[in-house]
């Protein structure tokens, strides 16, 4: 990976589908390198020496954690080691899974819905869905993962406070004819503030 982000998509270095020609890039890096002069040379260098394997690679602002991180969904409300912190319109907005190997990246999936739409998978087990590329943008400013629909009607801003503690700073998504907003300013459904729903199980934190 060029930047160390744990959201990735498969890209070909030279255009072939051979296994030894594949590299993993986050969507932002893939977009930045696409069509640039010298991109193939840069991709080959990245593939030969991935950032995550370099000695000075700093994981402290990235979600490399051996268990399930705690997720603050609103101020004062934290879901502790909960696989699905928020279930909206019957769909997990965010799903967490422990890493497949010791010291690996936390597995996470994201499903969001744009205005007048229904939630659909944007990230599945850390993989950026190829069919999402035209409609969604991924950014990683500092210790944040930001996923935004191109029409800006849906967005998730996830802060990695430590590898084991995350915070949903902003969530805006649609589904079932409703709009959910959650984060630093509490919970709103269709623009109306409502109490944070209580956790009902260890598997699902908040059901809306």
Image (spheres, grey):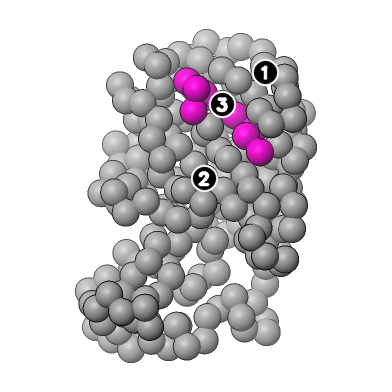
Q: Nearer the viewer, residue 113 or 202?
A: 202
Residue 171 located left or right of residue 73: left
Measured from the top left, where is residue 65 in percent x and y? 72, 58
Magenta-drawn stretch contains 16: no
Q: Main secondary structure of the magenta part?
A: strand
Which residue is denoted by mark 2 in the rendering? Answer: 109
The image shows residue 76, relative to residue 59, as above or below, that is above
Q: Can I make out residue 172 in this image?
A: yes
Q: Quadrant of residue 184?
A: top right
Tag nearer the camera, 1 or 3: 3
Tag nearer the camera, 1 or 2: 2
User: Nearer the N terminus, badge 2 or badge 3?
Assistant: 3
Neighbours of disc 3 within 10 Å: few (<14), some (14-19), many (20+)? some
At x 72%, y 19%, the residue is 200
Measured from the top left, where is residue 53 in percent x and y? 61, 80
The image shows residue 180, relative to residue 133, as above or below, that is above
């Amino acid at each position: 990976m060029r930047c160390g982000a744990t959201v990735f998509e498969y890209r070909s270095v030279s255009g072939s589908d051979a296994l030894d020609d594949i590299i993993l890039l986050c969507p932002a890096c893939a977009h930045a390198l696409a069509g640039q002069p010298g991109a193939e040379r840069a991709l080959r260098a990245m593939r030969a020496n991935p950032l995550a394997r370099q000695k000075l690679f700093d994981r402290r602002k990235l979600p490399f954690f051996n268990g399930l991180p705690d997720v603050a969904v609103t101020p004062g409300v934290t879901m502790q080691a909960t696989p699905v912190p928020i279930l909206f319109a019957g769909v997990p907005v965010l799903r967490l899974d422990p890493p497949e190997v010791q010291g690996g990246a936390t597995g996470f999936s994201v499903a969001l819905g744009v205005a007048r739409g229904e939630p659909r998978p944007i990230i599945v087990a850390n993989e950026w869905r190829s069919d999402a590329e035209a409609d969604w943008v991924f950014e990683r400013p500092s210790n944040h993962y930001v996923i935004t629909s191109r029409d800006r009607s849906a967005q998730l801003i996830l802060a990695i406070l430590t590898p084991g503690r995350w915070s949903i700073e902003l969530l805006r998504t649609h589904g079932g004819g409703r709009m959910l907003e959650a984060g630093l300013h509490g919970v709103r459904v269709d623009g109306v503030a409502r109490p944070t729903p209580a956790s009902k199980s260890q598997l699902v934190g908040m059901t809306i």
